[in-house]
Amino acid sequence: MKDAVRLYLPGFRGIVNFMEARRLGTLSVGAIGLGCMGMSEFYGARDDAVSLQVLARALERGVTLFDTADMYGSGHNEELLGRFLREHPGSREKLTLASKFGIRRMPGEYKRTIDNSPEYIRSACEASLKRLGVEAIDLYYVHRLETGRPVEETVAFLAALVKEGKIRAIGLSEVSAATLEKAHAVHPVAAVQSEYSLWSRGPEKDGVLATCKRLGIGFVAYSPLGRGFLTGTVNMDALPANDFRTILPRFQRARMDENTRRLLFVRELARIHSATPAQVALAWVLSRKWGIVPIPGTKKLKYLEENTAAEKVKLTQAQIAGLEEAFPCNADYGARYTPEGMQGIGL
């Protein structure tokens, strides 16, 4: 689909950049979204003033999907988006707001529990609506599935929230193809969100992408830049102690030396296209035969501009094949999360 996204916002000069539109169920969004998590935690110190500038510029650049969750900053991220909406009258109808529930954390701790109970879903939804300052959440994801609770029960309750007008569409995150089938049979699932990038190609081999395509379900790729690895700029020795990547297995020295060698072809393509490695990595995600919406996260204007310009990089089939040879689907790059985090993946 090649619909152009045009936005007119008070205070913005003229028409924003054109961006191809892609479908997430009944929702239409710009081809590149914005992951907002890092504006609140996991990647060093936060700066709300700069983050608000990034949000404004993203909308001006044609980004219409803003992705958050109640656990990001223990509510801070949703509050930040709520503040943005208040400070930019008229922006709400231009945006697709996605949020998530299901992961319960103590403030400042990584340790979590998963809760998909109807009581918690309702309380989490009401709290998110309040923090965002909106009447409905456009796309509401089950962030992680609760072991032992039938997904049909969870989706049935979310369907009730759709009828009530609290949410407009249902999403699932990091689920198996079989679970997706069961969920979609209860109520249409608009989108699946999973980690997907050159070095995280799990959705290809576990059947999730194929199932989404067959059922007409959108796919949202989080961490399409491999949590910064595919940009070629990550210096592990310079990361602050509170940076999430310092505890992730695939970022440990034993893995990073091997993984970094795979970046040579990405750098070469960046040179050929007068682009950056990040833009090449995003162009690969955008090139999938079936439309996928990547949501690269950033809290810096420089990287927002870089990411949104990636749509202009058009890779040849030979270049795509070369990238996939450098980053084979079945290669062992190291676990994406700690053992605790991996427990909620692919249920």
Image (cartoon, rainbow, N blue to C red):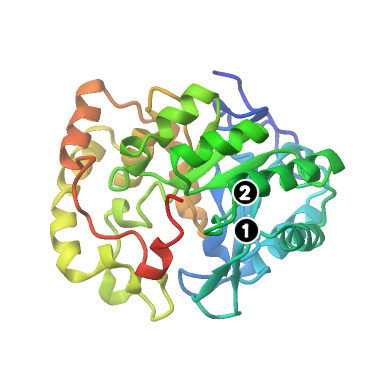
**Residue 265 coordinates in the image, percent (x, y):** 17, 41
Residue at figure coordinates x 34%, y 35% from the top left: 204
**Residue 86 coordinates in the image, percent (x, y):** 81, 56
Q: Quadrant of residue 75?
A: bottom right
Q: Single out the mark in the foreground, 2 or 1.
A: 2
Quarter of the picture containing the N terminus is: top right
Q: What is the crowding at mark 2: few (fewer than 14 residues within 10 Å), some, or many (at least 20)?
A: many
Q: Earlier in the sequence, mark 2 or mark 1?
A: 1
The answer to whether marks 2 and 1 mark residues whose Cβ atoms lie closer than 8 Å is yes
Label of residue 186 in the image? none
Q: Amino acid at mark 1?
A: Ala
Q: Is residue 340 left or right of residue 171?
A: left
Tell me if I can see residue 58 in this picture: no
Spatial separation of the CA atoms under disc 2 and disc 1: 9 Å
Residue labelled with disc 2? 141
Residue labelled with disc 1? 69
Which residue is nearer to you in this view: 251 or 144? Answer: 144
Q: Is residue 115 left or right of residue 181?
A: right
